[in-house]
Image: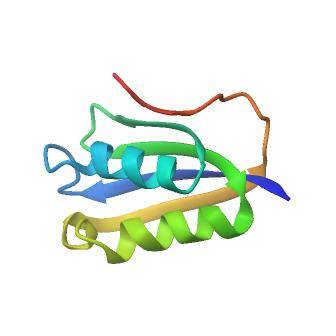
Amino acid sequence: MQQRVHIFYSGRVQGVGFRMTAEETAKSLEIAGWVKNLRDGRVEIVAEGEEAALKRFLEALQSGPMKNFIQRAEISWGNATEAFDGFEIRY
């Protein structure tokens, strides 16, 4: 079943390759959506895909090379809108 996850990561998550890592991970798991830096220093991600793939995506970000930069993750789940064709970095 397709799901949507909306995440706000805080910590030292900007300028360390976080967005690129999120994009590469999402594409490898066939997840659609986007990632972007926010002015307040957080990184925001909206991702859609199979629930199992989204859980692997979250696990990969939170336990992989970016784990030391993440201080907090605010995660909310919802129904997919199927509004995305792929995964991109937004500016």
Count of marks overlaid on the render: 0
Taking 21 as reference, is 44 left or right? right
Q: Which residue is drawn at 33% across and 34% down?
A: 38
Q: Which residue is drawn at 23% across and 53% down?
A: 13
Q: Which residue is drawn at 35% across and 45% down?
A: 43
In the image, residue 14 lies at what x, y percent? 20, 45
The answer to which quarter of the image holds residue 1 is bottom right
Residue 24 drawn above or below residue 53: above
In the image, residue 54 lies at what x, y percent? 61, 62
Find the residue positioned furthest to the right.
Answer: 1
Find the residue positioned furthest to the bottom.
Answer: 63
Find the residue positioned furthest to the front.
Answer: 28
Q: Which residue is drawn at 31% across and 56% down?
A: 10
Taking 37 as reference, is 68 left or right? left
Residue 41 drawn above or below residue 63: above
In the image, residue 3 lies at what x, y percent? 76, 54
Residue 64 drawn above or below residue 78: below
Task: Look at the image and tell me in which quarter the C terminus lies.
Answer: top left
Q: How is the image coloured?
A: rainbow
The answer to which quarter of the image holds residue 51 is bottom right
